Amino acid sequence: MLMTKAAHSRHTGVSRQTVYDRIKKGELVLVGRKIDVRTSSQNVNKRYTFRGIKLRIRGLLWG
């Protein structure tokens, strides 16, 4: 599923600046100018795991 940066920021409850920061860090994957939500959420799942336990980020559980 592809999503615009603004739609993704509303969907995840973060600012657009945070979305741009995550793109810059490589946490979010772009296809053209849109975010590939499935691939990006897989990246976040790998990144925000501690001892096999998924962590909550801003009240959302990814995955």
Image (tube, rainbow, N blue to C red):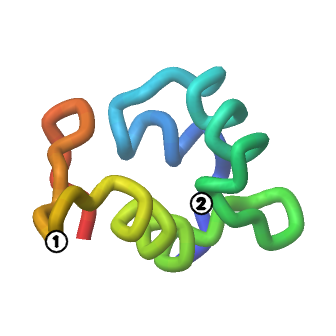
Secondary element type, mark 1: loop
Image position of 48 with respect to 14: above or below: below
Q: Local crowd at mark 1 within 10 Å, few (<14), some, or many (≥20)?
A: few
**Residue that lies at the very extreme toward the front in this rendered image:** 51
**In what element is the residue under mark 2?**
strand
At horizontal 26% and vertical 60% (from top left) the residue drawn is 49
Question: Which amino acid type corresponds to the residue marked 2 in the rendered image?
Answer: Met
Label 2: how many residues lie within 10 Å, few (<14), some (14-19) or many (20+)?
some
Q: Earlier in the sequence, mark 1 or mark 2?
A: 2
What residue does disc 2 label? 3
Give the foreground label among 1 and 2: 1
Q: CA distance from mark 1 to mark 2?
A: 28 Å
Residue hosting label 1: 52
Residue 11: x %, y % from top left: 37, 45
Please give left or right for residue 33 compared with residue 56 in the image. right
Residue 50 shown left or right of residue 12 in the figure: left
Q: Position of residue 2 (x, y in %)?
A: 61, 70
Location of residue 56 in the rendering, given as x and y in whole percent from the top left corner: 16, 44
Spot occupied by residue 35 in the image (x, y as percentages of width and height): 66, 61
